[in-house]
Amino acid sequence: MITQRIADVLDTAERLRCRGELTAARSAVDEVLRETPSARALLLKSRLLYQSGNIRGALDALREVESLRATREFTELRLKLEELEDRQRRRAPFVTESMARLSVQQGYLLEAIEIYRQLFETAPNRSEILDEIARLKLTVEREGSREADAERVRRELEACDRWLAEHPRGA
């Protein structure tokens, strides 16, 4: 159980985080964690690390929360962070439409979708890329993707659906 003083420090850290003062917020959270392994402090630490781009650190903090309070929600959050970390690790230093087409030819459709998603951010032909992503998604739903098990296909298609919803045609 956390004391009122610790709750106040964590409230302050959350306000700092919301204002973008991540270093100050992290200092406050670390101060709390030196005193007690609070699930709330660890969750806030995980969020701060994630916002700073440190997915590995965010995962480590989340695993500590899981050890204190193992619930389905924490497990799901950890799995999502692991997926993000894996994608970050796999991301090519540069991508081209030729790389995407080659991936399609070789049957690596999920990888091709990811390449097109990366290309979308800077491409002048955004609507064509959206069309290609949607077409590939339908193909993956029917046929799968090379070297991808059913669970990975399901997760990737869910992520693709969310991404397509965030990037509607004509927006």
Image: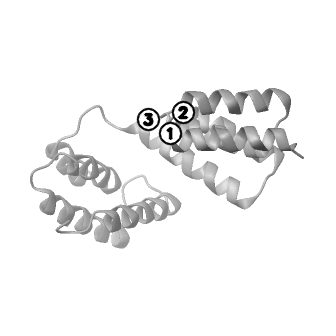
Which one is closest to the eye, mark 2 or mark 1? Answer: 2
Q: What residue type is disc 1 on?
A: Gln
User: Label 3: few (<14), some or many (≥20) within 10 Å?
Assistant: few
Q: What residue would you read off at disc 1?
A: 51
Between 50 and 157, the one lying in front of the other is 50
Q: Nearer the viewer, residue 5 or 121?
A: 5
Labels 3 and 1: the sequence-earlier one: 1
Q: Quadrant of residue 10?
A: top right
Looking at the picture, how far across and down is residue 30, in whole percent?
71, 28
Q: Secondary structure at mark 3?
A: helix
From the viewer's perspective, tell me whether residue 63 is left or right of residue 101. right
Mark 2: amino acid = Leu
Quarter of the view holding residue 56? top right
Q: Which quadrant does the C terminus fall into?
A: bottom left
Kindly identify the residue that appears in the image at 14 percent across and 44 percent down: 98
Alpha carbon distance from label 2 to label 1 = 8 Å
In the rendered structure, which amino acid carries the disc numbered 3? Arg
Q: Are marks 2 and 3 in contact (CB under 8 Å)?
A: no
What residue is at 33 percent from the left and 63 percent from the top?
A: 166
Residue behind mark 2: 22
Front residue of 146 and 58? 58
Question: Alpha carbon of mark 3 to alpha carbon of mark 1: how far?
Answer: 17 Å
Quarter of image, res 161: bottom left
- Callout 2 touching callout 1 (CB < 8 Å): yes
Instruction: Rate crowding at label 2 as few (under 14), some (14 to 19) or many (20 or more) other CA atoms within 10 Å.
Output: many
- Name the front one of labels 3 and 1: 1
Name the residue tied to disc 3. 89
Of the two numbered discs 2 and 3 on the same chain, state the one appearing first in sequence.
Answer: 2
